[in-house]
Image (spheres, rainbow, N blue to C red):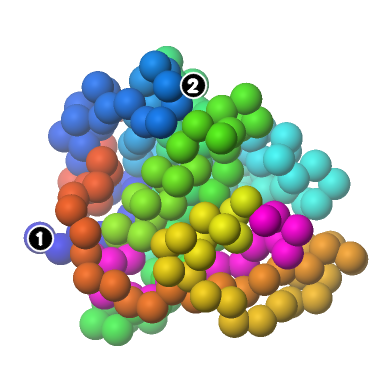
Amino acid sequence: MSPQPNAANAANAANAANAAATSAAGATAVSYRAATSADATACAEIEAQLFAGEQPWSAAAFQAEFALGSNFYICAEVSRRVVGYAGLAMLGPRTAPEFEVHTIGVAPDYQRKGIGRELLEQLLHAADSLHGPVFLEVRTDNTAAIALYRQYGFVDMGTRKDYYAPGISALTMRRPATPATPAPLITPTSEEPQP
């Protein structure tokens, strides 16, 4: 079955495969799994740290995002603690989709360890499996994220003045449709995850 861009439908098999996965976070074992409504508070807490003063998403906003069948949300966790999250929305029909990265966030104490890169790779694999281009907005002063996105084939499309808040603009970027790469750590399916 073709992957669905919906983290709520990720299979338990992916969670089991992730249990032993390590990322570039040194010796810290980082697992990647589908986000569930139970993760909304933890995601909102990280969001509040990352985007204080910029209208961070609430737990209710994350729950609403997780509930949409056209969205694919994943979490990174260490020792059962959510340390990162990422979300992708599918726009348009499955036969000719476009995708939009809605968010990627990593807790400050886990940044610069490859977790954000792995979260992005998971989102891109979901989009690539359906051969759709990917769009995103990123703060114009977030040079590290912009450099990462360029490494993955994103190109600048334009600037959205005051997108995040007065004086905080966004760079709009696009990555063309790309053939699917080897299987990701999270494989969305049509099965509901088990608690």
Residue 70 falls in image quadrant: bottom left
Residue occupying the far left of the picture: 1
Q: Is residue 64 visible?
A: no
What residue is drawn where x is 43% and y is 22%? 26
Residue 33: x and y in percent read: 34, 36
Q: Which residues are magenta?
A: 127-143
* 138 in magenta: yes
Query: Left or right of 132: which side holds 83?
Result: right
Disc with the residue nearer the chain's start (1 vs 2): 1
User: What residue did someone put label 2 on?
Assistant: 81
Residue 25: x and y in percent read: 45, 26
What residue is drawn where x is 18% and y is 50%? 183
User: What residue did someone put label 1 on?
Assistant: 1
- What SS does tag 1 mark? loop
Distance (Cα) linking label 1 and label 2 = 31 Å
Residue 38: x and y in percent read: 47, 32
What residue is drawn where x is 15% and y is 63%? 2
On-image quarter of the N terminus: bottom left
> In the image shown, does 107 or 87 lie closer to the viewer?
107
Q: Residues within 10 Å of mark 2 (few under 14, many from 20)?
A: few
Q: Taking 121 as reference, is 77 above or below it?
A: above
Residue 88 falls in image quadrant: bottom left
On-image quarter of the C terminus: top left
